[in-house]
Amino acid sequence: MVRMEVKGLIIDPIANMPVVILRDAEDKAFLPIWVGVPEANAIALQLEGITTPRPMTHDLLRNALSLVQAEVVRITVTDLLENTFYAQIHLRIGEKELLLDSRPSDAIALALRAEAPVFVEESVLEKSRVSSEKEDATSAERLRKWLEEVDPDTLGKYSM
């Protein structure tokens, strides 16, 4: 597994969809994950440190987990099948560890709120690279190459 950080949230100019950018600490591994607008908003709120007057869904989940003394240990992006990413939320309640199936966007939104680390299976990174090599001349490949080279700090922020 590779530990990753959420480096940014941008809009894919081709598909007009939000993209979460994950990178490892050494900038060797890179993974863009296209997400829905509601999930992007949940991630953006946390990245920007915005507190809402009432708890949003991911805040509610974090609060419920806290009430039952469950800790979000980490989230892991576990697979990539037919252009769909899969993730798991790793929880600990006392001595017991539990895994919850999740969409990566929801897992990331929760991890940011719980200050839990984000991991990606190396096989997912490899599948992502192989997938983009197959699409070599497509607009998705051009976007991927652009995303790999761009510094997320220089991009405009995702706006809600």
Image (cartoon, rainbow, N blue to C red):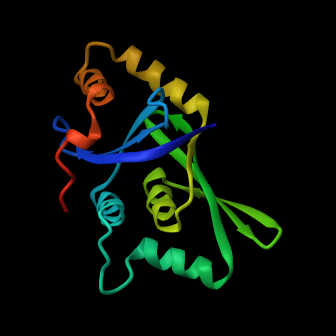
User: Taking 82 as reference, is 15 left or right?
Assistant: left
Q: Is residue 105 visible?
A: yes
The quarter of the picture where the N terminus appears is top right
Q: Nearer the viewer, residue 152 or 56?
A: 152
The quarter of the picture where the C terminus appears is bottom left
User: Taking 97 as reference, is 157 left or right?
Assistant: left
Q: Position of residue 86 (x, y in %)?
A: 53, 45
* Residue furthest to the right: 95
Q: Nearer the viewer, residue 27 or 57?
A: 27
Q: Nearer the viewer, residue 96 or 102?
A: 96
Residue at 51% across, 42% down: 4
Residue 129 lies in quadrant: top left
Residue 132 lies in quadrant: top left
Residue at 49% across, 31% down: 26
Q: Position of residue 159 (x, y in %)?
A: 18, 58
Q: Nearer the viewer, residue 30 or 144?
A: 30
User: Taking 26 as reference, is 158 left or right?
Assistant: left
Residue at 34% across, 65% down: 42
Q: Position of residue 81 (x, y in %)?
A: 52, 35
Q: Is residue 18 visible?
A: no
Residue at 29% across, 72% down: 50
